[in-house]
Image: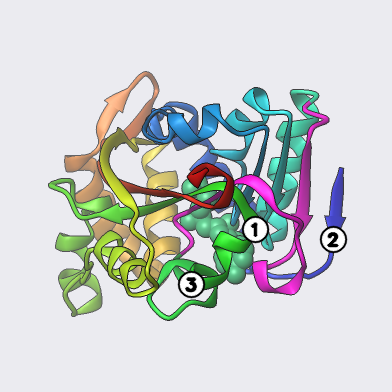
Amino acid sequence: MATRTAGAGSFWTARKVAWYQRANARSDYAARVLAAADGLVAESRTALDVGAGFGALALPLARRLARVTAIEPAPAMAQALQASAAQERLGNLVVLEATWDAIAVAPHDLVVCAHVSNLLEPGSTFLSVVPAVAWRGVVIVRDVPGDGDKFFFGELYPRLLGRPYEHGCEADDTLRALIGLGIRPTATTIEYSSDQPFESLEEACDFWIEYMGLPPDARGFLRGFLGERLRREGGGWVAPFRKRAAVIQWRTRAGRT
Ligand SMILES: C[S@@+](CC[C@H](N)C(=O)[O-])C[C@H]1O[C@@H](n2cnc3c(N)ncnc32)[C@H](O)[C@@H]1O
């Protein structure tokens, strides 16, 4: 079932969503996040996933819990999530196509919000109001910089965009903000595979051109650069990546009793 209340998200094209889905299909991301949050998940019957994307976490949660609500404003993401839920016959998953602040949602046992920068950065209203809609607990996932240089950006930014690739520790920012709000969360660092497969080197060039907003004439350089760094796999190519994240969680009302 889908409810549409707002249009948003021109950043997420159907092609970008499909790239993410292909990477996620071979990733242990959801397994690692849900293992770190297993205590809260096991105590929950219902979950609200805010900024659910194509359902990397909402789908496994719906397989496990009685009811899941997914809030996702980008049409391409919401449609992909809807299609996966229909394919798996997950009638207990409701997709609300809207931003978090555009709708009023009833409390759920568990609220999950993973990799949604504008909601998780210091000063965001979401961080102060989220405990009111979580009966048992909240789980937040944010990047932690690791050894893996995400998509070779550290090398490519200076060469193609003439500026350094700057990437702070998002998890520390959120933790500081929560502590400032009087919340005492726990944080578990997880590491997971985020390998990105491509059918061809040309498709890999499309990916970097789109992600970095490069002009079409960057293709020649990229073809040589990626041809040396990507790994051959079957008839295609893979960009191998390990990623790190912090699973930040705390108990709310019912969980404290
Ligand atoms: C990087 S994706 C993460 C998706 C998913 N949570 C995951 O961990 O794979 C961020 C998602 O948050 C959504 N989003 C961005 N701003 C939002 C907001 N204000 N309210 C709800 N969702 C939002 C985007 O459309 C996008 O699908």
* 37 in the magenta segment: no
Whether the residue carrying mark 1 lies under 8 Å from ligand 1 is answered with no
Give the residue displayed 49% in from the left and 61% down from the top.
116
Whether the residue carrying mark 3 lies under 8 Å from ligand 1 is answered with yes
Give the residue displayed 55% in from the left and 38% down from the top.
57
**What's the distance in space between the residues labelled 1 and 3, CA to CA?**
19 Å
Q: Position of residue 65 (x, y in %)?
A: 66, 28
Closer to the camera: disc 1 or disc 2?
Answer: 1
Which residue was labeled with disc 1? Answer: 133
Q: Position of residue 5 (x, y in %)?
A: 83, 67
Q: Earlier in the sequence, mark 1 or mark 3?
A: 3
Amino acid type at circle 1 is: Val
Dot 1 falls on a residue whose secondary structure is helix
Picture layout, residue 8 above or below residue 19: below
Picture layout, residue 49 above or below residue 159: above
Q: Position of residue 187 (x, y in %)?
A: 29, 48
The residue closer to the viewer here, 238 or 8, is: 8
The residue closer to the viewer here, 111 or 202, is: 111
The residue closer to the viewer here, 168 or 109, is: 109
Confirm or deny contact between disc 1 and disc 3 (CB under 8 A).
Answer: no
Q: Earlier in the sequence, mark 2 or mark 3?
A: 2
Mark number displayed over residue 118: 3
Image quarter where ligand 1 lies: bottom right
Q: Residue furthest top?
A: 234
Dot 2 falls on a residue whose secondary structure is strand
Crowding near the residue tagged with mark 1, few <14, some 14–19, many ≥20 C-alpha atoms within 10 Å: many
Closer to the camera: disc 1 or disc 3?
Answer: 1
Give the residue displayed 87% in from the left and 42% down from the top.
1
Count of numbered badges drawn on the protein: 3
